[in-house]
Image (cartoon, rainbow, N blue to C red):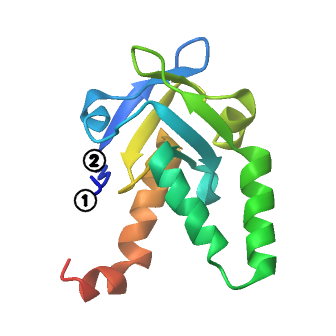
Amino acid sequence: MEKRIRLIGFKTVNLDDKGRIIIPTAFRESIHTGNFVMVPGFNTVLHLYPEESFKRLENKIESLESEEDKKYITDFIYSNSVEIKADSQWRINIPDHLLSYAKIKESVKIVGGNDKLDIWNTDLHEKYNDSLRTLGESSFKKVGL
């Protein structure tokens, strides 16, 4: 049986002068390899998919019925994403175009997103998280939260 990645919680880390961040130990324990694909998402977030999670995303995209949906998603993902390999200290480099997209300057909030990590500008994540409490109220109630 395949061991499933489960990433929860958050950590705030500083960006070094080379545009790198360290993947915190709390997240490393659930990730089987240091190979990732970084994908820009909506709300100026960066999604950091471990290699096996990205393969599942590709399978979901491939299974879409609409060729138009597939084209939009694949054109966006493959032209803007990057493959990233963590070094021995679990540092990853965030390319300038993605730092700019996510409005990241000094520190980032790394948020568990089940099978991926979300990398946020800390202020933008706070605003987004606050909006979830209001916008998602009925959804939370459906599962007893």
Location of the N terminus (image quadrant): bottom left
Within 10 angstroms of label 2, few (less than 14), some, or many (20 or more) residues? few
Q: Of helix, strand and loop, which one carries label 1?
A: loop
**Quadrant assignment for the C terminus:** bottom left
Type of amino acid at the residue the image marks with label 2: Gly
Tell me, yes or no, whether the two marked residues, 1 and 2, touch with CB atoms within 8 Å: no
Q: Which residue is mark 2?
A: 9
Percent position (x, y) of residue 54? 53, 52
| Foreground residue among 26 and 15 | 26
Left or right, residue 134 beside residue 55: left
Q: Is 117 situated above or below 63? A: above
Going by the image, does 9 lie left or right of 92? Answer: left
The part of the image, by quadrant, that contains residue 34 is top left
Q: Which residue is mark 1?
A: 1
Which element type, helix, strand or loop, lies under badge 2? Answer: loop
- Callout 1 crowding tier (Cα within 10 Å): few <14, some 14–19, many ≥20: few
Q: What kind of residue is marked 1? A: Met
The answer, for residue 23, to whether it is visible in the render is yes
Residue 138 image point, x, y percent: 34, 87
